Image (cartoon, rainbow, N blue to C red):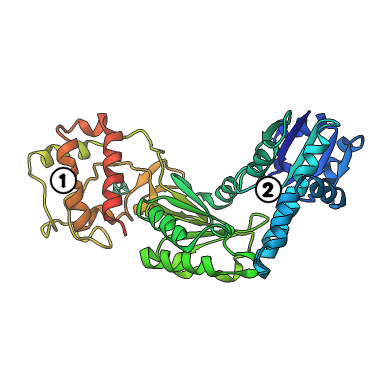
Amino acid sequence: MMINLISMGSDIGNISINAFNAIIESDIIVNYDDIDLSDLDTYLKDKEIIANDLEEAKSVEDESNDEIVSDLDESESVEDERDIYSKLEESYSKIELAISKSSNGNVALICSNNSNIYGIANLLIQISSKYNDVELKIYPAISPIDYSSAVLGAPFNDLVAIDLNNPLLSIRELRNKVKFALKTNFVIFIHNPIGENGDKTNFNKLKEIVAKFNDELLVGIVNENYSYEISQFKDLNEEIIKEDSYLVIGNKLTYKLEDYMITSSDYFVKPKFISHNIDFFERYLNDETPKGLDQECPYLPCHETLEACDFCYCPFYPCADGITGGEWIKDKNVWSCQHCDWIHLEEPCKVVRKGLKRKLKDKDDLKTKHLELLKLRRECLLKTLK
Ligand code: SF4
């Protein structure tokens, strides 16, 4: 018979249709996380439901898991370790119970939203490999990563996920992972920010590493019921971080747009051109445009922070990416660069000029190589943003 591992998602309303059908087609329900299933009462009435009672699970485990139990007995009697072992023991018991029940019919092993990432899918596969004839099917739910992303807006592009309180994670491994992720510009998803009994050892280490790298990175704290807070890392509101919170640490390309945390991605709009842009770049290619501040210009100062007028017209227009301050003018379908100072600072100007030597050979390249130019922009942003 089949064991259907079903993740319920952040709430029961987010369950997939496939998962729902698998519950209906199962004969036995093992409620792994004691989730409130009352919304499904109509569909569950003819089924054997096992929940809130570990006695049966324990007896199954006692028969089949002697090895683990004897290990537990011999373990050091350190309080934290005991907690971890007792949780593990509970998980083993429930999974063994589901496996033993599957000889009587199809089982739906229902768990909360974390079965596939940091969840019991791993354990279920490993334990079931002890037996012949155990068939598994795993029904995914909205993962904590998807949930956090939806709550915050769109913070993820390339990302790494770290379980900060995996009991097997050493401080050295934690440090290496976080440093690597920061250096290589990944957005970081943190699961389990606080450990058992409020242990903040790893959290404090994380804070130390991120603060040293760049305390201006954006961070989102995501809690239950779509509640969240976004701030710079240096203003992180520790008070609201709980054991089951999720943290999302943005990268250099992450910014706040209205109430959302978003990271520049591969979204771009078809370029529109005005003749001034084309004329400007024709002169640029002939080396006839200004370098540095153009003191003669009647429009000076046209930007709040202005160090160089090299790109009075921007080769990336319209980048449609607010990380540098550009924005849509509401209801006009026009991209405004009024608040983008980045392209008018000396360092980015230098880096963009150098890159354009490779990419821009003719003024019409502005129209035909927009994607290439946006790639160059990203490269220049990564080199010049803090
Ligand atoms: S927002 Fe900045 S980088 Fe983007 S098109 Fe405008 S000037 Fe160029």
Left or right position of 299 against 120: left
Please give the residue where the numbered disc 1 appears in the rendered image.
354
- Look at label 1 and name its amino acid: Lys
Compared across the picture, whether 11 is left or right of 339 comes to right
Which element carries disc 1, helix, strand or loop? helix
Q: Residue 10 carries which label?
A: 2
Q: Quadrant of the C terminus?
A: bottom left
Gap in angstroms between the C-alphas marked 1 and 2: 48 Å
Q: In this view, does 264 lie to the left or right of 92?
A: left
Q: In which quarter of the image is residue 340?
A: bottom left
Task: Tell me which corner region of the image, top left, top right, bottom left or bottom right, holds residue 70.
Answer: bottom right
Choose the circle earlier in sequence order: 1 or 2.
Answer: 2
Q: Given this view, does label 1 or label 2 mark the residue nearer the observer?
A: 2
Task: Tell me residue 27's x, y (percent).
Answer: 85, 32
Label 2 neighbourhood size at 10 Å, few (<14), some (14-19), many (20+)? many
Residue at x-position 55% and y-position 57%: 168
Q: What residue type is labelled 2?
A: Ser
Q: Estimate the x, y position of residue 175 in percent, counting from the top left.
A: 43, 61
Considering depth in this image, is 107 or 305 the residue closer to the camera?
107
Mark 1 is surrounded, within 10 Å at the Cα level, by few (under 14), some (14 to 19) or many (20 or more) other residues, namely few
Horizontal and vertical percent position of residue 229: 56, 62
Residue 240, relative to residue 310: is it above or below? Answer: below
- Residue 305 position within the rendered picture, expressed as x and y whole percent measured from the top left: 26, 62
